[in-house]
Image (cartoon, rainbow, N blue to C red):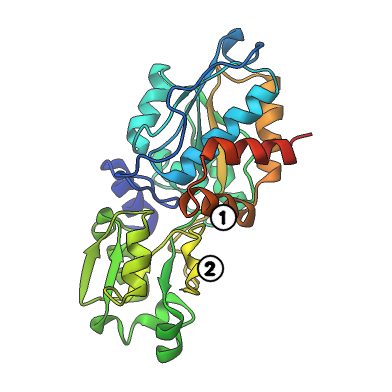
Amino acid sequence: MTRTTAFAAALLAGLTLSACGGDPMDDSGGSGDGGNGDGGGGNGGGAVTVGSANFPENVLLAEIYTAALKGADVKVQQRLNIGNRETYIAGLEDGSIDLIPEYTGALTLYFNEEAEATEPEGVYTELQEALPDNLTVLERSEAQNKDAVVVTSATAEEFDLESIGDLEPVAGDMVLGGPPEWEDRYTGVPGLKEVYGLEFSAFRPLAAGSNLTAQSLKNGQIDAANIFSTDPAIVENDFVVLEDPENLFVAQNIVPLITTEANDDTVTETLNEVSGSLDTEVLTDMLARVSNEGEDPADVAQEFVEENMG
């Protein structure tokens, strides 16, 4: 089985968001069903319903889309913390939501198990080709949130670790931590074994996107971890993100996914401006304010829009 076919099979088996990671136990952030802004735009003059997956970063991005659209006089409603990809794609299909922040690599493989691109532009092109007629993606942002294999700086120094493959001689004495689905998902334990020859002594399931993973790594309960690339815990703890030269983890640029019925020129122009203002550093900083400092994602989103939208 090819890398992409196996990964797609895992996604289609009902697993949660990949490169962007999610914590199904998280109930933070968002403003629930939200209120409506004034004016028209989108969905034939009705409200555009913005959804999100159930993890803090995706909620924050949905709040940014909401604030930007309201600023453009588009009526907006919200349905946040919906769940995994299978659940919210169904929502796009049945009309219960119109728009959601997505991640190019995982979404491409959801719709096309034969996708082969790994770099941002190629992945985005394959995504556009793979989408059904009722869905479209707008411009991708430079911001990415990818799966990453992370170790402490002490571990990296002790074993001279720079890339994932450098773990091969020592993985047998290490415990790997990651979201429960990583035990079976190709971009997890199976892929690490096939692509990099890694066989860890044990795998410890931990809630994705939660502080528990970082704390477990910091405290030595695990030796290597799947921590998503925008997680502020990486910088705060001086963790080392191991390079992925074999591209096990494909590009995961953030992109608005919207139904064609709800889209119009105002929506397109507004969300393209959002994407043009987002990069990984900016997103990581905003996520730190939400996850670590307890700020309301709606407030952080509004500040971003006021500072970046013309």
* Secondary structure state at the residue bearing disc 1: helix
In this picture, is 252 found above or below 52? below
Q: Label 1: few (<14), some or many (≥20) within 10 Å?
A: many
Residue at 48%, 58% in the rendered image: 231
What percent of the width, then of the height, locates residue 255?
57, 40
Residue at 55%, 29% in the rendered image: 136
Residue at the far right: name it. Answer: 310
Q: For residue 128, say whether it is visible.
A: no
- Nearer to us in this view, 128 or 300: 300
Quarter of the figure with residue 24: top left
Q: Is residue 153 left or right of residue 168?
A: right
In this picture, is 269 found above or below 228? above
- Nearer to us in this view, 31 or 53: 31
Mark 1 / mark 2, whichever is N-terminal: 2
Q: Quadrant of the C terminus?
A: top right
Q: For residue 177, say whether it is visible.
A: yes
- Mark 1: amino acid: Thr
- Mark 2: amino acid: Val
What percent of the width, then of the height, locates residue 214?
38, 65
In this picture, is 97 found above or below 18? above
Circle on res. 284: 1
Residue at 27%, 41% in the rendered image: 14
Residue marked by disc 2? 235
What percent of the width, then of the height, locates residue 52?
44, 34
Q: Quadrant of the N terminus?
A: bottom left
Q: Label 2: few (<14), some or many (≥20) within 10 Å?
A: few
* Secondary structure state at the residue bearing disc 2: helix
What percent of the width, then of the height, locates residue 297?
52, 40
In this picture, is 226 found above or below 26? below
- Nearer to us in this view, 62 or 108: 62
- Nearer to us in this view, 297 or 180: 297
**Circles 1, 2 touching at the beta carbon (< 8 Å):** yes
